[in-house]
Image (tube, rainbow, N blue to C red):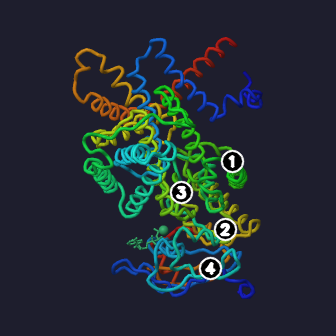
């Protein structure tokens, strides 16, 4: 096909539009509950896949922070937990609507995220990693001790969301997760393609150039932290309404490291990569490895798997697994054009 | 010299000093760059040239002295004490001795970073690609493309900066400086690492920036051919101290300058 001709073609432009592609991707994810209906999946698998979608939201936030701005955080789990507990408290105890509760939870977490952002102005690298880890641990202790709000070790319950007067089913809630993810993918893409994204790039690539070009490091560090915390808290809100409960044991460093693994495995600065990473890190161990003989019984299997994946990716695929797709496409194109050339000759 | 009196001072440095521990990197230095001038700052390795640039652009806070700049508002302002990121908004932009580009971004986006302060759309507007955000993005992308065109590398606009040859990256830095609509451009060794023909092109570009875009240029450069060829006036320093200031021929004849360069420039450029 003649490409110059194709570029002007409205069908081709529609197909190339990134937002259209995000929606198409979302539509595919929405098919999952129907696969369950025809017996390909069971209900447990729907929860696993929903979980991966939820953690992609948090991982998108971490990718903004780590991939784009070059700032590390090992405290993601704490903020997802905060979003979860706050949403549960706002809906169950205060009787607020789900979306109001979620917005409140996001606002609360973002405020704390901003404080951590202030810390990032003073410390960087390893020290920032430790500082964010400490914040997360403090949050975790809070979840354990504030029984009256968090339910302590017995956990906190929540319900499926009620939207416009109807309470969603599990499948309905799953569809809501997909819709939120797709919206966030669009939003994130817009953000990183604009001057905000370039400022983050500049901050990571060369702080001196960033400053000389007028990027206010204070402002953009705080923005990066605020945004990534907001994403984490949103993930928490989605989690608690989909899983319908929250326990302190979920929000430990293990989860933070798994979300970090998502970004590394999927690919820094890649939106689809983040989703792919989340599906690899959270679905493969549960739905595939656990079914294998012998290996399936190893305790902490997911953890080991993600660790091994990180090492493999860093060593052989530093751009992340998402690069596999473009590499495969490049290879396919070369094969096709090679064949075409032979045919002409 | 007479016509200098009629021109306004673009940048006036007076009694500038900075020391690192016991080392006086810049010692009581004064010089003035007039509008539309191409002004060279020269000196042997370690003389303190980059340090002077860092004091002007506020990466370093000088221990003493003042840096007055005729800003794009028409006012003359003191730069000392201002936050680094606010300097470019006044119309003063710089390049770096060791190129500072973002490897993971295409050349065009690297150049767009130079227009950062011109973007008015909020993060919110950008996230939703509201009309103003879209308009700005389109407008400045075009402007960045023009800048790449001026430097003759627009054909590489969409290639990643990582892996581009050094000469191209030097030009990207220059393009990035241009899109900020500067009144004064400070160039730290723009010809370092360039071959002869690239240096030739560079000197044309610098003249073009002055003559057609109307910028004042202050540059540090070791390539004496380039410096003597394009500078209207030159200031020479050594060990952070002022040696001489004048036209290229005056500087070449100056005994102090010759002494400072003795041993360094033997058999070098004339
Ligand atoms: N941040 C700093 N801390 C300590 N010493 C510094 C610092 N910056 C510069 N110096 C010292 O100040 C002196 C002047 O350095 P500067 O980089 O300004 O020289 P230069 O004239 O640009 O040299 P070159 O031509 O090699 O680029 C050197 O002795 C350098 O080691
Ligand atoms: Mg230098």
Whether the residues at callouts 4 and 1 have beta carbons within 8 Å, the answer is no
The nearer-to-camera label among 3 and 1 is 1
- Residue highlighted by disc 2: B182
- Whether labels 2 and 1 belong to a single chain: the reply is yes
The quarter of the image holding the N terminus of chain A is top right
Which chain is home to disc 4? B
Which chain is home to disc 3? B
- Whether labels 4 and 3 belong to a single chain: the reply is yes
**A213 left or right of A122?**
right
- Whether labels 4 and 1 belong to a single chain: the reply is yes
- Answer whether residue B255 is visible to the viewer in this image: no
Which chain is home to disc 1? B
The nearer-to-camera label among 2 and 1 is 2
Mark with earlier residue (4, 2): 4
Secondary structure of the residue carrying numbered label 1: helix
Taking the spot 69% from the left edge, 65% from the top edge, the residue there is: B181
- Residue highlighted by disc 3: B193
- Residue highlighted by disc 4: B69
Residue A327 image position (x, y, % from top left): 51, 27
Query: Residue B154 got which mark?
Result: 1
Taking the spot 64% from the left edge, 13% from the top edge, the residue there is: A342
Secondary structure of the residue carrying numbered label 4: strand
Report, in whole angstroms, how far the alpha carbon at label 3 lies from the one at label 1.
Answer: 21 Å
Report, in whole angstroms, how far the alpha carbon at label 2 lies from the one at label 3.
Answer: 25 Å
The nearer-to-camera label among 4 and 1 is 4
């Amino acid at each position: 096909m003649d490409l110059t001709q194709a570029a002007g073609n409205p069908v081709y432009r529609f197909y190339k539009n990134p937002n259209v592609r995000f929606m198409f991707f979302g539509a595919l994810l929405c098919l999952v509950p129907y696969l369950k209906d025809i017996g390909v999946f069971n209900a447990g698998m729907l929860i696993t896949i929903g979980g991966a979608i939820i953690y992609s939201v948090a991982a998108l936030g971490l990718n903004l922070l780590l991939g784009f701005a070059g700032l590390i955080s090992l405290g993601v789990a704490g903020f997802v937990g905060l979003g979860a507990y706050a949403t549960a408290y706002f809906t169950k105890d205060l009787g607020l609507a789900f979306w109001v509760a979620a917005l409140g939870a996001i606002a609360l977490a973002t405020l704390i995220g901003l404080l951590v952002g202030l810390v990032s102005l003073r410390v960087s690298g390893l020290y920032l990693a430790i500082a964010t880890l400490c914040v997360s641990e403090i949050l975790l202790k809070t979840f354990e001790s504030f029984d009256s709000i968090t339910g302590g070790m017995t956990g906190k319950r929540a319900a499926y969301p009620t939207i416009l007067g109807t309470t969603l089913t599990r499948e309905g809630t799953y569809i809501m997760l997909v819709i939120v993810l797709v919206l966030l993918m669009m939003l994130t893409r817009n953000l990183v393609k604009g001057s905000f994204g370039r400022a983050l790039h500049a901050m990571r690539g060369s702080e001196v150039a960033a400053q000389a070009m007028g990027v206010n490091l204070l402002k953009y560090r705080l923005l990066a932290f605020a945004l990534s915390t907001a994403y984490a808290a949103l993930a928490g809100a989605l989690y608690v309404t989909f899983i319908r409960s929250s326990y302190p044991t979920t929000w430990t460093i293990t989860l933070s490291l798994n979300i970090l693994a998502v970004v590394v495995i999927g690919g820094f600065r890649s939106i689809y990569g983040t989703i792919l990473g989340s599906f690899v890190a959270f679905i493969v161990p549960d739905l595939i490895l656990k079914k294998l003989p012998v290996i399936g019984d190893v305790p902490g299997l997911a953890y080991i798997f993600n660790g091994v994946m990180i090492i493999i990716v860093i060593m052989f695929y530093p751009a992340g697994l998402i690069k596999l797709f473009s590499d495969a496409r490049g290879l396919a194109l070369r094969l096709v054009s090679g064949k075409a050339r032979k045919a002409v000759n | 010299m007479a016509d200098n009196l009629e021109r306004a001072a673009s940048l006036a440095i007076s009694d500038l000093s900075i020391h690192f521990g016991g080392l006086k990197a810049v010692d009581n230095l004064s010089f003035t760059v007039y509008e539309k001038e191409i002004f060279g700052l020269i000196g042997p390795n370690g003389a303190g040239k980059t340090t002077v640039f860092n004091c002007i652009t506020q990466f370093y806070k000088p221990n003493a002295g003042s840096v007055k700049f005729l800003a794009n508002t028409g006012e003359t302002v003191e730069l000392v004490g201002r936050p680094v990121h606010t300097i470019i908004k006044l119309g003063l932009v710089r390049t770096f001795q060791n190129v500072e580009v973002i490897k993971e971004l295409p050349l065009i986006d690297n150049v767009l970073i130079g227009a950062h302060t011109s973007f008015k759309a909020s993060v919110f507007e950008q996230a939703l690609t509201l009309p103003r955000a879209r308009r700005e993005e389109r407008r400045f992308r075009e402007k960045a493309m023009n800048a790449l065109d001026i430097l003759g590398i627009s054909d590489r606009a969409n290639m990643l900066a990582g892996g581009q040859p050094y000469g191209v990256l030097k030009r990207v830095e220059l393009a990035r400086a241009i899109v900020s609509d500067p009144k004064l451009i400070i160039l730290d060794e723009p010809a370092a690492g360039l071959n002869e023909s690239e240096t030739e092109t560079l000197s044309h570009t610098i003249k073009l920036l002055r003559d057609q875009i109307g910028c004042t240029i202050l540059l540090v450069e070791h390539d004496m051919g380039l410096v003597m060829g394009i500078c209207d006036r030159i200031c020479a320093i050594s060990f952070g101290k002022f040696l001489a200031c004048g036209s290229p021929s005056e500087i070449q004849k100056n005994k102090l300058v010759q002494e400072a360069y003795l041993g360094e420039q033997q058999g070098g450029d004339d």
